[in-house]
Amino acid sequence: MLAAAGTRDAVARQTVADAAVALGERLGLPSAVSYASGPGPRADEAVSGLRKAGARRVGMAAYFLAPGLLYDASVDAALSAGAVAIAEPLGDAPQLVRLIGARVDAVLAGPLATAA
């Protein structure tokens, strides 16, 4: 199960749902998504749904940059529903840092940068 902070933006929620599907495909396991705030299932609902669908063990992957109130709420909810493993937030993962750097480089090389 992929837990994220949440948003009212439907397009953003779809992006998170797509990431959950990709995670499930990569792991070869059923997947679900949950949100700590806004519309959509909470972590306990996602864990319960996977268990009702036959999963014997459910873990929570964290789509959070850093620990905090929303991450903690997702952890507590997932554990209360029987999750057996919880991933740490993404933090300063080298891949994430490279992605941020690439996006900054793209903005700096874009049309607005040359107009200045």
Image (tube, rainbow, N blue to C red):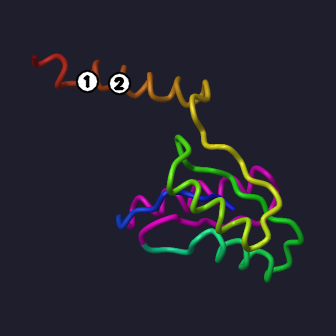
Mark 2: few/some/many CA within 10 Å (<14, 14-19, 20+): few
Give left or right: position of 68 versus 106.
Answer: right
| Residue tagged 1 | 110
Q: Secondary structure at mark 1?
A: loop
* Residue 55, quarter of the rendered image: bottom right
Quarter the C terminus occupies: top left
Give whichever of 115, 61 is nearer the camera. 61
Q: Based on the picture, tell me whether residue 20 belongs to the magenta stretch.
A: yes
**Residue range corresponding to the magenta coloring:** 10-38
Name which residue type carries label 2.
Answer: Ala
Report the disc number at residue 36: none
| Residue tagged 2 | 106
Which residue is found at the position 56% from the left and 45% from the top? Answer: 67
Vertical relation: 56 (above or below) 93: below
Which residue is found at the position 86% from the left and 78% from the top? Answer: 54
Q: Secondary structure at mark 2?
A: helix
* Residue 79, quarter of the rendered image: bottom right
Give left or right: position of 54 versus 116.
Answer: right
Which residue is found at the position 28% from the left and 19% from the top? Answer: 108
User: What predominant SS class does the magenta segment belong to?
Assistant: helix
Name which residue type carries label 1.
Answer: Gly
